[in-house]
Image: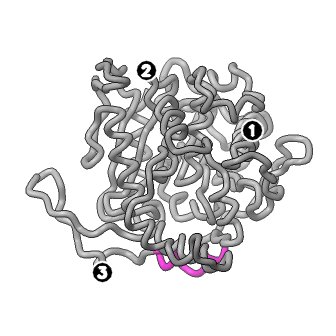
Amino acid sequence: MAIPAFKKAEISPGVHVSYIDSWADKPAAELPSSYTTIIGLHGVGFNSAIWTPLLPHLPASTRFIAYNQRSYTGSSPAYQSEKEGGTDATAAYLGDLLAFLEWVVAEVKLPGVDDATSEGGIVLLGWSKGTLLLFSLLSLLHASPSSTTSFISSVQPTSTSLLTSHLRSILLFEPPGSAFGRPPTADYTEAMASVSPPNSSTPSQFADAFAGWIGSYSPPSASSNPDFPSQAPVDQLPPSGLAALDPELLAAAWEPQACAHGFSWRLAVAGDEVATLAKNAIAPPLSPSVPVGFIYGARTNGYCLDAAKTVGGWWGLNPFGEVEGGEKKVVVEGEELEKEKKKVAIKRIEETNHFAFVHQPEAFAKVLEELLDELV
């Protein structure tokens, strides 16, 4: 596969990021007047080249842009946190996202949302730890007096007009349970025990253990429900962990030296604070101000399955089968509220895991297209 070349953007004084653009080689004269742009946010240990397998399967009318967070290839060094939980780093990286949005709209001239058709505009797609930036963004949009949002007080928000004119929807692909303040599941604890305190490990050993776990499969589950396909044994599924990536993609995308820093910044210090912030971000008392979609692989690791179950509970949707948009009810703070049509949706991809867009890029692209149609 051809790995896209990284380009560079100076998004604020002293801060630059590298990025890929699926349409970088298209002459300006050949660009349509209106199209949708997906901006991808990568997770821990993998830079934006990880999205490469997905690009050929996207609709012809969809542009894909993804930038490398600080500490990854071609971008500025990591933010040196001074606060407990690294919440000041979280604020800095949210600022980077907003600055990149401003830069890319101005410099690349991305079209906004068409008011007549609700098409076009920007869709933010977060994967794994990258979803925390989207929780943070939604916390700006869903202002709360809670102290859990104090970490973003220093962030200068992107102009309201830009968010109104360009931000179409937000898609979350497998946020980890830590994004919801959930305790680690047994699969995570077992996989990481030997490289976590009180045990010692090198950065390389920690990164390898993390990659092996995050890309692992859950055991097959039995179900008599005809709507749930039978699940294959793990040894019949595509390779797990780093083996899921071919050598060229692994060399381009895997950055193990960035893993330790990726674990160091959070939405809040305590788990209950994280849970409060995350719930207010994607399941506020009223409908989300921006449509939100959730995607997960049916055979992903236990921590991400736990996250899917958590979101399904918040939204009043069944996370263990495909859920169409529509009039749904959700229980928030003990009160049953009516959700606006197609404001939230959950999509499940069978027989895959945290690397769904690597294992099944065509199916992943199809789910993206469905969500773009459903979420308005």
Q: Where is residue 235 in the image (x, y as percent from the top left)?
A: 30, 80
Residue picked out by circle 3: 235
* Quadrant hosting residue 228: bottom left
- Give the residue type that dot 2 points to: Pro
Give the mark nearest the N terminus, 2 or 3: 3
Mark 2–mark 3 distance (CA, rounded to whole Å): 44 Å
Magenta range: 241-252
Q: Total number of numbered labels?
A: 3
Q: Is residue 228 above or below residue 91?
A: below
* Quadrant hosting residue 1: bottom right
Residue 251 within the segment the image draws in magenta: yes
Residue picked out by circle 1: 95
Q: Which residue is drawn at 51% across and 37% down?
A: 278
Residue picked out by circle 2: 285
Left or right for 174, reference 205: left
Give the mark nearest the N terminus, 3 or 1: 1
Q: Is the magenta stretch mostly helix, strand or loop?
A: helix
Q: Of all residues shown, which one is farthest toward the front?
A: 198
Local SS, label 1: helix
- Give the residue type that dot 3 points to: Asp
Mark 1–mark 2 distance (CA, rounded to whole Å): 26 Å
Residue closest to the eye, 287 or 236: 287
Mark 2 crowd level (few <14, some 14–19, many ≥20, 10 Å Cα): some
Q: Which residue is drawn at 61% across and 44% down?
A: 269
Q: Where is residue 334 in the image (x, y as percent from the top left)?
A: 32, 22
Q: Is residue 211 above or below residue 120?
A: below
Mark 3 crowd level (few <14, some 14–19, many ≥20, 10 Å Cα): few
> Can you say which quadrant of the picture contains the C terminus?
top left
Q: Is residue 243 above or below residue 111?
A: below
Residue closest to the eye, 152 or 123: 152
Q: Residue at x 57, y 31 (%)?
A: 138
